[in-house]
Amino acid sequence: MSAIEIIPTGEPRALAGLAAKPPAVFLPDEETAERFFGFFTAHIRNRNTRRAYYKAACRFSDWCEGRGLDLARVKPSHVAAYIEKLGLPEPEGQGLSKPTVKQHLAALRMLFDWLVVGQALDTNPAHAVRGPKYSQKKGKTPVLDRDEARALIAVIDTSTPTGLRDRALIGTMIYTFARVGAVVQMNVCDYFSQGRRGWVRLHEKGGKEHEAPCVPKLEAYMDEYIAAAGIADDPNGSLFRTTGRSTGTPHRMTQQDAYRMIERYARRAGIKTKIGNHSMRATALTDYLRNGGSLGKAREMANHADTRTTQLYDRRADVASLDEYGKVGI
């Protein structure tokens, strides 16, 4: 029986098309295959994590197949050799960054643990394997200064519902420090009034629900967009919708849609920095801290679990460094 034939019917749709073929090493029999896919359906709930971990499993499976290894014969030395190869520059290795290599190792550790608990394996061959050392004190997400952020919003043509939508979407990310994944998942009812002020309800990672008040500017953006789009009477419908040009029917915007939109406006505004969705969140947090905001409050507003994560968004030192280097009088 082939590996493809024994894939359970419960394989998550989110995994379809992510790999050229199923990870055969993890599918030696029907019982192990069910346990394998159960890891992604029952244990990994975050869609992005599920996608990344599945790709890691498929890549490791291909590596094992190329060396004639089956699941029962995988040893710590094999996992260590695979992890080492991921970080080597091409053509000797895969040329992956250290954070990506660490993510692959984390995926394999969790997956093998799951298989051990389900008695599909006796031991976890990835348990003792160490990944590359990596520490990060400052985030790498590109940020804009205040004038650039204002210029980005100013180039939006707000004479159309599409422009009003784009301004409201960008404004939500900036004025609430929201992740793009939470913003595009908002429904119309997730913008509501409380205490004579507009509020947004964000469904963040890990099933966390976070509510934030709208500053007057964002409140105006949202009100104008919803009125122009005519979606106020559809509370359970998606808030940020596509224009329906390709399919004829509006759908919920994706993170990729938002990225392309931001990239387009950045070009119009003459912004040379290569920015993306997360740049809006990083820009807002940096501007808040530069304006005297506290790190503790920034953590709460960004819905971070730890201030160390919030500190990665603090780029105030960049300006100080530029001032110091500028003292070179040559």
Image (cartoon, rainbow, N blue to C red):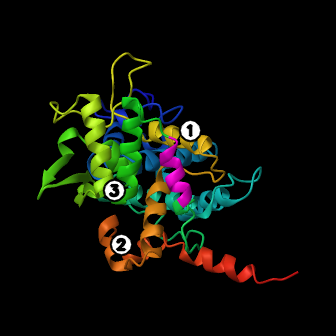
Which of the two labelled residues, at mark 2 and mark 1, occupies the earlier sequence position? 1
- Where does the image place residue 48, in percent across and percent down from the top left? 40, 48
Magenta segment: does it hold 314?
no
Location of residue 265 with respect to 293 vertically, above or below? above
Give the farthest residue toward the left: 195
Which of the two labelled residues, at mark 3 and mark 1, occupies the earlier sequence position? 3
Quarter of the image where the N terminus is located: top left
Residue in the picture at 16% in, 36% down: 235
Give how far apart the Cα atoms at labels 3 and 1 are. Answer: 43 Å
Residue in the picture at 88% in, 81% down: 330
Secondary structure mostly seen in magenta is: helix
Which residue is tagged 3?
A: 114
Magenta segment: does it hold 151?
yes
Which residue is tagged 1?
A: 264
Location of residue 134 with respect to 181 vertically, above or below? below
Element under label 3? helix
Mark 3 or mark 1, whichever is nearer to me? 1
Question: Between residues 273 and 112, which one lies in front from this camera angle?
Answer: 273
Question: Between residues 101 and 237, which one lies in front from this camera angle?
Answer: 237
How dense is the environment of label 3, judged by Cα within 10 Å: few (below 14), some, or many (20 and up)? some
**Can residue 46 be seen at all in this image of the molecule?**
no
Residue in the picture at 29% in, 39% down: 224
Amino acid type at circle 1 is: Arg
- Where does the image place residue 296, in percent across and percent down from the top left? 33, 79
Instruction: From the viewer's perspective, tell me whether residue 308 is left or right of residue 80.
Output: left
Residue in the picture at 27% in, 50% down: 219
Callout count: 3
Give the farthest residue toward the front: 159
Give the magenta part as a residue range: 147-155
Which residue is tagged 2?
A: 298
Mark 3 or mark 2, whichever is nearer to me? 2
Which of the two labelled residues, at mark 3 and mark 2, occupies the earlier sequence position? 3
